[in-house]
Amino acid sequence: MIPAGPPQAPMASEPAPRPRVVNDSAAVSEALAGEPLAPGLVELLQKEVVVSLRRRGIEYDFARFQAYAAAKLNSTAGAYTGSEVTGNCRLGWYDHLFRNPLKATAEAEQFTRKLHTAAGDDPGSLSRILPILAEKLDLPKRTPRPFLAVNSPEQALDVVKQALVGAQGAYAAALAPLTKDEIQELGANLYPVLVGQNHVGHTLADRGTGRRLCDLMERMDRSALVNAAEALVPLSDPKLLEQLKHYPDSTNVEAPGVTGHVVAKIATPAGAIVIGGKEVNTYRLDDMSDVAAVIDLGGDDTYEEGTVSSERPVLVILDLAGNDTYRATQPGVQGGAIMGVSMLLDLEGDDVYMARDVAQGSAMAGVGILIDYAGNDRYWGVRRVQGQAVGGVGLLIDRSGDDDYHAAMWAQGFGGPLGFGLLDDLTGDDHYYCGGLYPNSYKPETPGYEGWGQGVGAGIRQCACGGIGVILDGEGNDVYQFDYMAHGGGYWCGLGFARDFGGNDKRLISRKAFDGNERTEELFQRFGCGWGCHYALGFCFEDSGDDVYEGTIMGSGMAWDCSVGVLCDFGGDDRYEAAGGLTQGCGAQAGLGILFDYRGDDVYLGYGQGYAPPSISYHDVPRCGGNFSFLIDYGGKDSYGCGAENNMCIQRDGPGGFLIDRPARDETTPSVSASDATINARESRH
């Protein structure tokens, strides 16, 4: 029997159920990040979708959609399949979510909340993040590494020595499955083939060599890569960093490549440790090739270059105080690595990070970590920067301050093949910009710039499946600006996640070009704010605040070509300003697109809300099931560009198109009778 009302009967005469509360202490701790009822709200969303499909009699069509997607995975599981889609570099978690699209949103919500809670743990953030990402990268389960008790500067320095040796040994183990010639091949080609030659986000200029490099990275011991990161975990303990501050600076030694007071230069099996004094210093890091670590005790310092590669596989920078400047033109710097392990920890000050490629918590076939503990900071880079990874781990964590992030492509929480890229900014009113430099690869069909950042996991078309990209922001009124293929999206068998846990936030099309001048391209954005494209899944979550979502076409909970795209906003008076086609909860070419908004007086511009195109050209009909589009809004007095009224369910073109508007629990009144409640189950064509 088909139910007359929505799931758990949240109708006009009976309020929506309160999301269930979990008593497990760990789960409760995770729920404290952002909206505590978010897990229950996502459960409500899932039930709404299931009941709506059943009520309209198309639940078997959706079952065909799931079966078709699973069959696509099965048929493309091999390393070489004769088609563009192959199984190389494919992650198990991606496979699981793709086969279970209705459960995917709940897992994405839990994952982003758990990850952000781990990042917010001080001093244990890094030790808690690494086990989470290891699991998602198909690596053996591990537990958080404990910190060592440190009671003196000398003990702290001993920990630094042990960490350097451990990281270097673990990275050597990561390369062990490769021959010497293969290692040299990676070192010679990673940057030019995967970065330098490219101005297009979705593929490479040299796809054949790109495929070869991805296959080599897949053969590396990726568990040993995480071991290398874990070896550096003790250095992120603020107690250790505070002890290092008290290292005596009465001596003065010479250190090539350093201008200013140098306290000590200490030899270790992994390379030298240079300790700079509390005055102003300049470190020309590429002139310090024998150095594996720099510890600076204070002052407004300047760091130049600092490449990490097979030539210098480990470099750690610990800056303990001052407003510092990091400048570089070479790749693999500022907590970035191309075949190596890099860590940059800056404890205090308003800092500036200026680089070009593979920088600021970025890695290729390695590990890159940047943690900035305090200050209003500025991050500027071009490609593969600010929490980006291919064949490894790239982490950028900024713990406080009003920060500015500026990049052009593959940035700000971007995961390429076998990569986990994370940018997590815990507090402050922050500004993020990604795009504005390279004309988009769909031109001349549409104008605009490449973006490819802010929580995007993407494969390389005709080369390899995608990785995991995540951008998280804790609190503050933030502004995100972006161009094509950006903000909470998945592309080519990848997984992307964007979540902001609080504040009145704006997600906008980039207003200026990358260099700050006027755009030469028309204001136009395609795929943004919770989207999936070409066998991928993308999620965008907003926990609270009065928010703005912009775009032009194909965004705001949009899925294209056997994909899943979801946008969930859990509170506030919001504006969805993407007025072009296929926006606001739309699935096309056998896609599942969802936009769920809970509470608030919301405005939806344009006509596309919950619209399901009736035809499909990419896949076999009816075998692929169809298109499934959901815009579900609970609570508030809402305005829809398509003309829909509040407290109604309407069909949006194809049978899989749903626009569902329901009152929230506290908006119901005793005067509404049970018979009147059928307004919420009434279906009409619109």
Image (tube, rainbow, N blue to C red):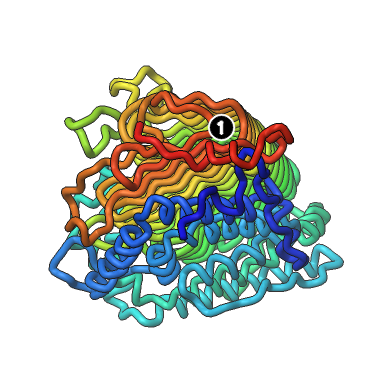
Residue 78: x, y in percent?
24, 75
Query: Compared to 305, does 682 lie above or below?
Result: above
Query: Compared to 517, does 219 lie above or below?
Result: below
Residue 491: x, y in percent?
34, 52
Place residue 404 in its image quadrant: top right
Q: Residue at x 59, y 26 (%)?
A: 637
Closest to the observer, 24 or 275: 24
> Residue 625, can we see it?
yes
Q: Residue at x 53, y 71 (%)?
A: 135
**Left/right of residue 466 with respect to residue 639 in the rendered view:** left
Closest to the observer, 498 or 63: 63
Q: Residue furthest right?
A: 151
Residue 398: x, y in percent?
63, 46
Q: Residue at x 61, y 63 (%)?
A: 129
Q: Residue furthest top?
A: 518
Place residue 174 in its image quadrant: bottom left
**Left/right of residue 181 with respect to residue 278 in the rendered view:** left
**Left/right of residue 264 with respect to residue 243 in the rendered view:** left
Residue 259: x, y in percent?
61, 44
Q: Callout 1 environment at 10 Å: few (<14), some (14 to 19), or many (20+)?
A: some
> Residue 339, can we see it?
no
**Left/right of residue 531 with respect to residue 318 in the rendered view:** left
Tag 1 residue? 431
Closest to the observer, 365 or 328: 365
Query: Compared to 200, does 685 lie above or below?
Result: above
Question: Dot 1: what SS?
Answer: strand
Q: Amino acid at mark 1?
A: His
Closest to the observer, 623 or 29: 623
Q: Residue at x 42, y 39 (%)?
A: 683
